[in-house]
Image (cartoon, helix red, strand yellow):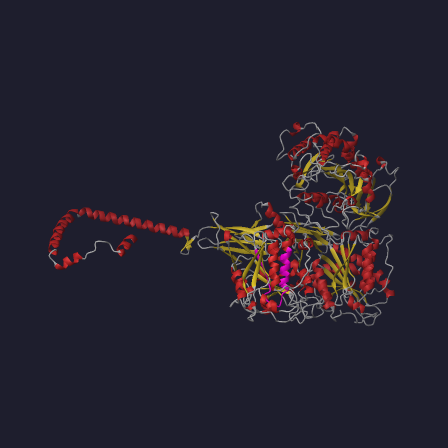
Amino acid sequence: LLHPTPPPLPLPQTPLTKGATKPNLMSELEPEIYSKYYNYDQLTDLLKSLAQKYANIANLTSIGRSVENRELWVMRITRDPTADGPGKPKFKYVGNMHGDETVSRQVLIYLLEYLLEKYGEEPRVTELVDSTDIYIMPSMNPDGFEKSKEGDCMGKDEGRNNAKNVDLNRSFPDQFEEIHVNAEEMPEVAAVMRWILQNKFVLSGNLHGGTVVASYPFDDSAAHDNEGTYSRSPDDALFRYLARVYAENNPVMKTGQPKCEENINETFKDGITNGAKWYDVAGGMQDFNYLKGGCLEITMELSCCKYPPSTQLKTEWDNNREALLAYMEKVIHIGVRGFVRAARNDAPLADAVIMVAGINHKVSTSRFGDYYRLLLPGTYNITVLAPGYVWYIFMRENCMCGFYILRTVLWFSYIIWLGLGKNIEDSRVTVQPQDFRHHHYNDMELFLQKFSSEYSSITRLYSIGKSVQERSLWVMEISNNPGVHEFGEPEFKYIGNMHGNEVVGRELLLNLIDYLCRNYGTDPEITQLINSTRIHIMPSMNPDGYEVSQEDISGVQGRNNTNNYDLNRNFPDRFNFVTDPRQPETLAVMNWAKSYPFVLSANLHGGSLVVNYPFDDSPDNVSIYSKSSDDDVFRMVALAYSQENSQMYDGHSCKGMDLYQEYFKDGITNGAEWYNVHGGMQDWNYINTNCFEVTIELGCYKYPPAADLPKYWERNRRSLLQFIHQVHRGVKGVVIDSKDGFGIPNATITVDTINHPITSNVAGDYWRLLVPGKYHLTASAQGYSSVSTFVNVPKEGVEIVNFTLNRIHSYTNGQTTEDTTPVLDPSVKEFQSLIKQLSGESGLDKLIKDTPTQSSFRYRRYSEVSEFLRGLTLNFPEITSLQSLGQSVEFRTIWALEISNNPKVQEPSEPKIRFVAGIHGNAPVGTELLLEFAASLCINYGKNAAITRLINETRIVILPSINPDGRELAKEKDCTSTAGKTNVHGKDLDNDFFEPQPETRAVMDLIQERGFTLSVALDGGSVLVTYPYDKPVQSVENADTLRYLATVYANHHPKMHSGDTGCPNSQMGTIPNGVLRAAEWHSHMGSMKDFSVDFGHCPEITVYTSCCLFPPAEMLPTLWAENRKSLLSMLVEVHKGVRGVVKDKNGKPIVGAIIVLNGGVRVFTSEGGYFHALLAPGLHNIEAVADGYQQQSQKVSVSPFEAASSIIIEFDMENDIFGLPRELVVASAAAAMTALVVTACIIWCVCSAKSNRQKDGFHRLQQHRDDYDDEIRLMSMGSKKSLLSHEFQDESESDQDTLYTNKL
């Protein structure tokens, strides 16, 4: 599976007149000496020099870059190499895919030198270059080459893999194994894939080393046996021939005895081998070329020694020169070639499909309408298909003098004109179904198993669930690549027998399966339909009802399911609340519809003869036309069906039946205009998914005699096919991230005149049904700038519209800022890529598949839980730490287990997540799930890269049992008992976070440490998720985020997201998305989640894992399987939202700063100034506040698929003084000081002037005063009072005097 694979993008061109090009490169060209290796710089200089010297036939470009930023050079050699045109088949050689297999690199350098030098001199070379578009890539893995060592024949040193240690020849999408292509881990693979898909290469060779043999597809098999399994491709004979062409022209290879030192006795008959028979290679490039690129490629192993001494290079060139040339010549000398053009105007038809009867491998025309199909001598029926045109079949007898006389094998050229046509039946013979009968359940099951076995290459039989009576709800997938969503390919579904007594749809769909399978590869229309569409067929949605039905015209026996509910009144409705409990058949279909990117669907019924389209009900419950936003589209697809059924199109649904007097113009009707249906499936599909669904009534007899079934098939065969064709109407394309080239999941595609957006699939591809016309389309996604464009939808076929969106980094002062994030540390980029990968639709599924668990589930009492936790710390001491938070009333320890790569070290930059269980002792499922979760994480640490990285980047704290005393009192299989719910004091701990018990006090202390980013509590008694608050009247400031976190958990649970708890005596009915605000579930005060939000500033959700509080132990494996993916999703989710660091202008971190989210919720910075807050996807206001600093604010965009947006907040000093701007206060103070100084100067001047005028007078007064003082002193000495006073006088200063003096 492509790990979000981008669509074809323009190849990066490397101009030869810029950058590293030297002034006189041509003069530096020296004769080749065939005795030295060229390193990357030397190779670059040589290629640029050759491109300049031979500019008339050579053009150098780069198709991408390696991990270490080296160019992936490709030399194009042909006449007029900078222009594209028709008439020349494309050929390529790729070398040095494994960096330490170096002979391939050098012989391709010698080959391109040889072609350039001999052009115009040797007729053979001149003809080859003139008639072929040749592309040579000497090194696909330049990083690996630089690490390899000359003389290393066995590849023991580094160099085989790329710089990320990825084997490039195990990393391509594979037909038998799910392989994700991560462009950051393997940019070389991503670049070559784009190159292959953009160019319609005809033939290719992939050069390796390590032995001497030519290996051909397939490289692996479904069984993946290590060796010995011949995996045959449809072109097996042709591949063997091509491999022999190379081997016969290599003197060592043709012997079939390479005599390599590592395996001296290994032999290959004729010097060739089937890849999988030799040894199984999943993810190989040659199979990808054939299956996805339409290009035939073989792998040539050139030498026993992977990196031989340079002195052997001349020998290797001599051994391979003739083989390299002879193999290239096959692209111009065998098979058929020609052009496909429109008959009306002779215009070339691009992407027309060329098919050869009996060979299940198609090629297609280029944009110039030319095609090339390599074939061996023989007589072939060749079919040409183009959307909107009549197919064309012709026969060619390939006259040849001899099979092995190579030079007499010539191309036979054709020009094929296709005429416009629609639904034209030609004289071709198709295989029709022969077995018309009513199939009961067992018979139907065997029928499906038979066709799945006989046509395994195009079918996959799977069940989406079970009926009330445990019958499987079977679906047959028919596709040329079953089991895989192919990028850009729409998905379609048919559903029959929803009402058990309406049986015609069931039998027609079995007939359709028969017809599609038997005619694939021989009938052009069927072949094209299966090659271009992923078709899902469910013959019976109500197998239980069918089993009790009987032949009848209009009866009701068997209509409903076993629980006597009408399944077509059981879906959530837009106008009326459906009170009936959701049935297992309904839930299965709802989950199915949300699990696949269906585009178009039909639900087959009986009882009338009409195609009924949405909406099925109206707000006032009256029969009135209830138009949907896509009414024109629905009418178009409905007419496509009815027009092919003449009886239906006539409009008189049931002629001759007195009971029915209905008339439907053109055989179609709006559902509500006919009659109101509440809870119908077709409306639910349209409103809740990207899928457009109609309901087709196939006839007035609900259960006709078996003898009538051939008539129904004949009337509806063309309609069934034509309706599938409608999935290819409108527009389709991909929404791409401009930064990394990946598809953007869940992007929204809107049409300006239609109020019904659709969303992109996990790989970014989308499909939007539209009637012909001109539209204005807009693509938008959380965290990206929107892009709009105009598009003309054609009358036939689909218009391709791709969107490239730029990321939004932040909003500052109301202005959008495109993402200009600096180049990140490779390790950080790698982790961000991991989060994005795990957030994709199949990311966690693959992780679970790669980390199977083998536990024997059982319930553990307190002592066993303690032993288990200690065992984890003893076996995994480097990543675990066990801490006692306190003790219960009966002195049992409340344990907390931390799992991280540094469990005893505080790492504030890492998010911290808390998993809690057992707050109610009578609901111990959560305890067992968390113990298993902890064990699986520890066991896979160091073994699975994703688990290892998540643990390295996260602090995981697990509290498996808060109420161990209550757990000891509870009893297994007590589904509703309250025994053990409370602690031994009779306190419900989830009501006790105000007046705490010992157990809650222990948890409160942990919560109040803060630092937690997210908390998940597991409980029991239902199947849903609740979010804060439990308080009945408490407003929720960040309700969107809390609801979103709960929804993430529910969406990864196979049942929870459907909203139907399935619990006996449930009073809630359907819970939207399985998520509810806690107070709406059971409101109460003093809950743990409320305390976590209010005092720990950490969001907490509560997961109710099962209807039964204490289910039997046998159910634990099922409950683990249901919750494991959701638990892992929380480990991924905790890395999203927004994170960052707060510091001042000097770079000093600010601890305790307040981060205000959207004007409400607050988090605080920890040590190092770090903060991390989870937020729902969207645009959010972030404000930072700290004492003494200016308040900072900005807007950040949060994506549901990306790791947390990282921001840096820098504080300036507080700018206000006494509530006024600092500048104003400083200016005012300066003005006041200036005024005071001026005033003081004036006073001093005035006083000084007065002093000068009165100087003499003051002097005389002073003399008189001195005389007077002496007189007073003499008088005082005679006073007794004065003597006493003088006796007790203290000459020292008092403390108060000193203090006062100091203040002055």
- Locate residue 1065, reporting x and y percent: 66, 72
Q: Is residue 59 left or right of residue 828?
A: right
Indicate whether residue 1022 is drawn in magenta.
no
**Residue 13 in sight:** no
Where, by quadrant of the figure, is residue 268 drawn?
Answer: top right
Count of numbered tags: 0
The residue range painted magenta reads 912-936
* Residue drawn at point x = 56 percent, y = 61 percent: 1038
Q: Is residue 88 left or right of residue 405?
A: left
Along the viewing direction, whichever of 1090 and 793 lies nearer the viewer? 1090
Considering only vertical position in the picture, is 1289 above or below 243?
below
Along the viewing direction, whichever of 787 and 296 lies nearer the viewer? 296
**Residue 767 in sight:** yes
Considering only vertical position in the picture, is 890 above or below 140?
below
- Locate residue 456, reporting x and y percent: 80, 54
Where, by quadrant of the figure, is residue 317 drawn?
Answer: top right
